[in-house]
Image (cartoon, rainbow, N blue to C red):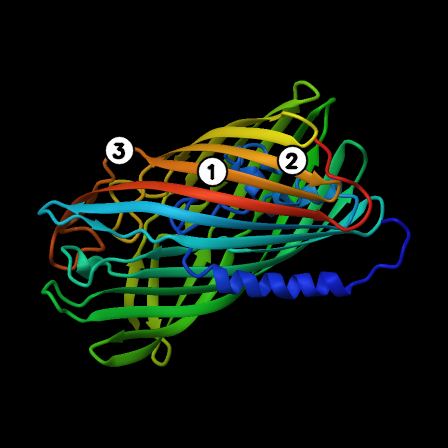
């Protein structure tokens, strides 16, 4: 840490500005990690389709694995800003295609503060969950969904410990604000008013991680983010009547396994397998706050989500590094549970990135990711389906999304950004 006096004012200012930025910018998150999950936490990671993030050493990789902090030996700050440009279309069987996707900006920010030669404190502010879709007021599937907004801010202090040159471990605490606002028409006729369910909550969870360097140039990492129980409280509104309502939603746990291997001084390859426990979310009942009577329910019926990705990076020079990755995501919904709020199919993910080391203490990352939906994305709601409201609805859907991610890295003390 250079042995000098540490001025905490810039760090305190950073934390306050980061929290404010997260609240202001993460207003319209478009889910890109299955259901309403968000995976855009690192510009460097997106450049390889997040391949190998749990085994890497970038500060933003601590989102997936807090043990990644152990490689950071100086005060470091990283900021990420993602632009989402989705194309999500629903084509009802009777015609009248509607586009429901919305463009969005979503930030994430990170801080690392080494305590001694073995221990590093870290802090992340991110948005792990989000969704924003819009439909016309009058469309064929309006009784099953109009507008959807899910928003979250997660503050995650962490601590890593380097046991020896081979093994590092890490752990953290998550404090998460979660908000949901969902609406659908009260009837199939044009001009039917909306029923709106909204609520918010604060929840607490944890994260754990480990990195192992068993041979020269190679690393293996595994990270875990726990489920968080959100006791949502708000109201259910319809026909000019509002009723206080509550529901419990358990956001899913996540496990990310990554490997990285240096093949030459300039070329590295990596891979990831990520599992998300979406199947823990089945039917979410909504109760009256005053009487405890069930008012309605959200029959989500998710299955587990999976991501498999491989990637590589090559140092073009001491200043530039090129990255690329490809991934395949198994969506947590299928033809039996796909709905009009997020009609996602399985996806192919293509990514490319470029890093530029401007100076010893400043570096930039740029990544572009294309998610390509596979298959017809069938939606079928009929008798016997727990979502059925008396009017059958069938449609096909398509999803394609472009994500542009930029990152800024700053070292405030000591070491420089060198090509790795």
Q: Is residue 412 visible?
A: yes
Contact flag, marks 3 and 2 (Cβ < 8 Å): no
Residue 361 placed where, x, y %? Answer: 74, 44
Question: Measuring 28% from the left and 61% from the top, which residue is drawn there?
Answer: 147
Residue at image mark 2: 56
Residue 237 placed where, x, y %? Answer: 28, 75
Q: Which is more N-terminal, label 2 or label 1?
A: 2
Question: Measuring 13% from the left and 51% from the top, which residue is drawn there?
Answer: 383
Structural crowding at the residue carrying mark 2, measured as other residues with C-alpha within 10 Å and reported as few (<14), some (14–19) or many (≥20): many
Q: Which is more N-terminal, label 1 or label 3?
A: 1
Residue 136: image quadrant is bottom left
User: Seen in the image, is 228 located left or right of residue 350?
Assistant: right
Q: Is residue 176 visible?
A: no
Disc 1 is placed on an element classified as strand
Residue at image mark 3: 375
CA separation in Å, label 3 and label 1:
23 Å
Question: Measuring 41% from the left and 54% from the top, which residue is drawn there?
Answer: 104
Residue at image mark 1: 368
- Quadrant where the image shows the C terminus: top right
Front: mark 3 or 1: 1
CA separation in Å, label 1 and label 2:
20 Å
């Amino acid at each position: 840490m250079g042995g000098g006096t540490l001025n905490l004012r810039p760090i305190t200012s950073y934390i306050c500005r980061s929290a404010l930025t997260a609240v202001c910018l993460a207003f319209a998150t478009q889910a890109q990690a299955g259901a309403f999950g968000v995976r855009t936490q690192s510009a460097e990671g997106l450049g390889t389709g997040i391949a190998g993030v749990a085994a890497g050493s970038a500060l933003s990789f601590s989102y997936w694995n807090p043990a990644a902090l152990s490689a950071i030996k100086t005060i470091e700050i990283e900021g990420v800003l993602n632009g989402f440009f989705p194309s999500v279309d629903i084509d009802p069987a009777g015609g009248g295609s509607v586009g429901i996707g919305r463009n969005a900006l979503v930030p994430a920010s990170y801080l690392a503060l080494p305590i001694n030669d073995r221990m590093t404190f870290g802090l992340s502010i991110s948005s792990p969950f989000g969704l924003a879709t819009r439909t016309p007021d009058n469309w064929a599937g309006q009784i099953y969904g109009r507008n959807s907004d899910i928003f979250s801010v997660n503050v995650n202090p962490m601590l890593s410990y380097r046991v020896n040159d081979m093994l590092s471990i890490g752990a953290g605490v998550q404090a998460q604000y979660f908000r949901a606002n969902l609406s659908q028409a009260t009837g199939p006729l044009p001009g039917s008013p909306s029923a709106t369910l909204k609520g918010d909550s604060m929840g607490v969870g944890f994260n754990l991680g480990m990195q192992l360097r068993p041979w020269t140039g190679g690393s293996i990492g595994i990270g875990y983010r726990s489920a968080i129980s959100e006791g949502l409280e708000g109201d259910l509104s319809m026909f000019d009547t509002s009723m206080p309502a509550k529901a419990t939603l358990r956001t899913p746990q996540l496990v990310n396994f990554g490997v990285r291997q240096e093949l030459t001084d300039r070329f590295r390859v990596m891979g990831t397998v990520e599992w998300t426990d979406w199947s823990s979310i089945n039917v979410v009942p909504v109760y009256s706050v005053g009487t405890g009577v069930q008012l309605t329910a959200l029959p989500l019926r998710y299955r587990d989500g999976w991501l498999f990705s491989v990637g590589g990076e090559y140092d073009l020079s001491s200043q530039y590094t090129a990255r690329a990755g490809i991934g395949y995501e198994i969506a947590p919904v299928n033809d039996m549970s796909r709905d009009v709020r997020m009609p996602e199919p399985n996806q192919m993910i293509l990514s490319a990135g470029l890093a530029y080391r401007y100076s010893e203490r400043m570096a930039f990352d740029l990544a572009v990711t294309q998610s390509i939906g596979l298959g017809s994305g069938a939606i079928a709601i009929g008798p016997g389906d727990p979502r059925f409201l008396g009017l059958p609805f069938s449609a096909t859907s398509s999803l394609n999304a472009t994500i542009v991610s930029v990152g800024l890295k700053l070292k405030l003390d000591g070491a420089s950004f060198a090509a790795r």
